[in-house]
Image (spheres, rainbow, N blue to C red):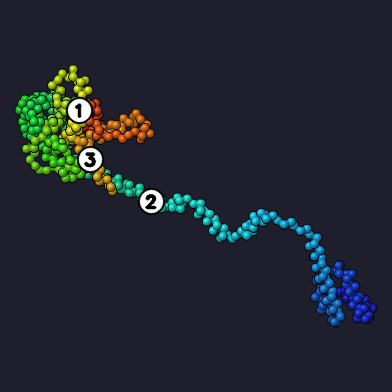
Amino acid sequence: MILRGLSAEACLLTTHDRADLVCSAATEQVEIHTRRVMSCSRRTLLLCTSSHRRATAVVLLRSVVAAGRSSSTTAAAATPTAPPADKNVAAAAAPNAAGKEGPSEKAAAAKKRLDENESVFSKHGGKMVLGFIGALGLWFLRSHLGGKALDAVKDQVEEACPLEPVEVEELRCSNDFPPDVFDKVLDSVRRAFPSGRATYPEFARHVTSSGLLPEPMSMGFLLDRMVLTAAAHRGILGAAARGETPHSGGSSGEGGVEGWASISADAVELEVDFLMVAFSAAVNTRPAERTRQLWDMAQGRSMGATDRGQDQDTDEATLLPASKAISLVGMLMASHQLPSGRYAVKDESRVWPVQQYRLASGRDAFLEGLLSLHEDEEKRTKGWIERKLAPAYDPAQEEQISFELFERVLRSGPVCAWGECLGIRNRDKL
């Protein structure tokens, strides 16, 4: 376009003069028409047909490019140079610049940090819960099987028991003997059998023929069944009736529930004290009077042998050897005057995997009664910490028993003689 603006006179000049003229004109117009020249550069090349015009256009384009470069260089030189960044700042900014991670890398890093901070429960919570449930299930199963073993011993005792609880009450209530009848019979039997042993037929004949009873005994066959069943037992109960040392057997056999045998019980010599304990079931007295009668019998005297108004306080102050108290409890068990649940005790030799039970002896029941009374007393007088710090109590160390303690043992839960630990409505559970 610039070339077209040249006058016609310039075209008549020489080639050298013409080129100078074109360059000077282009220099004057370059600043004004820079953008216009750049947009029209290609069109200028097409319009220049002669070699001189092409050369002029090339020179023009080069000058424009050089001018653009010089302007950019000047602007860069005029721009102030930024001070060098601090090394610490650069080091801190380096991870940020290089830490632009993708979503997957961020998720992986977060999961790694979470795994490092996880606790044992969060890692193995499911396994721990399953293990707890399994252990709880095994505990319930073990308790269930242990309860079945206990019930098995109770059932065997109840099946072998010669009298039902109702029959025991009928035997006691049908004979309205005064309390002194027991003392008279005891004194007479001791004189008749100085060895302290007799068969049941001999005992029965002496009691019925000596005129000691104010009236004939009613329902005496129940007493016969009670005594003869104990005499026929070869285990713990029979040993207590015969005055022998009982053996703590298992749930069956010599010391167990299945120790009854079809032997002739009429010829078995029994302890006179056991015969009197069984006879006490036919005397309609209160539990306190029965306890006093058994205590005096163990002391070697009867209630009628002394003046009770003068010597009762002295008798209560007298101590009884623990062995005799244990023997009395064993005789009560042999005559089935204790609830059936008191005949089962844990077998310490068979604890795992399931707790087994065996037939209890008089010693087992008596020591359990002492331990129960001691624990109750500790709970009333001491706190939890004092009880834990106190030395363990061994009831077997008791060598002498007072009347008060003997009475409390008979009324305790582990012994529960005549159902005294039970309510009136539960007396039929004997």
- Quadrant of the image containing the C terminus: top left
Residue that badge 1 annotates: 320
Graded by Cα atoms within 10 Å as few (under 14), some (14 to 19) or many (20 or more), the crowding at tag 3 reads many
**Residues marked 3 and 1 touching at CB (< 8 Å):** no
Label located before the other in sequence (3 or 1): 1
Quadrant of residue 232 within the rendered picture: top left
Q: Residue at x 36, y 32 (%)?
A: 386
Quadrant of residue 288 within the rendered picture: top left
Q: Please, what secondary structure does the residue beneath circle 2 have?
A: helix
- Quadrant of the image containing the N terminus: bottom right
Residue that badge 2 annotates: 131
Hey, which residue is sitting farthest front in the picture?
87
Q: Residue at x 22, y 37 (%)?
A: 364
Residue that badge 3 annotates: 344
Q: Residue at x 55, y 57 (%)?
A: 109
Label located before the other in sequence (2 or 1): 2
Please say whether residue 165 is visible from this viewpoint.
no
- Which amino acid is tagged 1? Leu
Hey, which residue is sitting farthest bottom in the picture?
50
Q: Nearer the viewer, mark 3 or mark 1?
A: 1
Q: Position of residue 237 (x, y in %)?
A: 16, 38
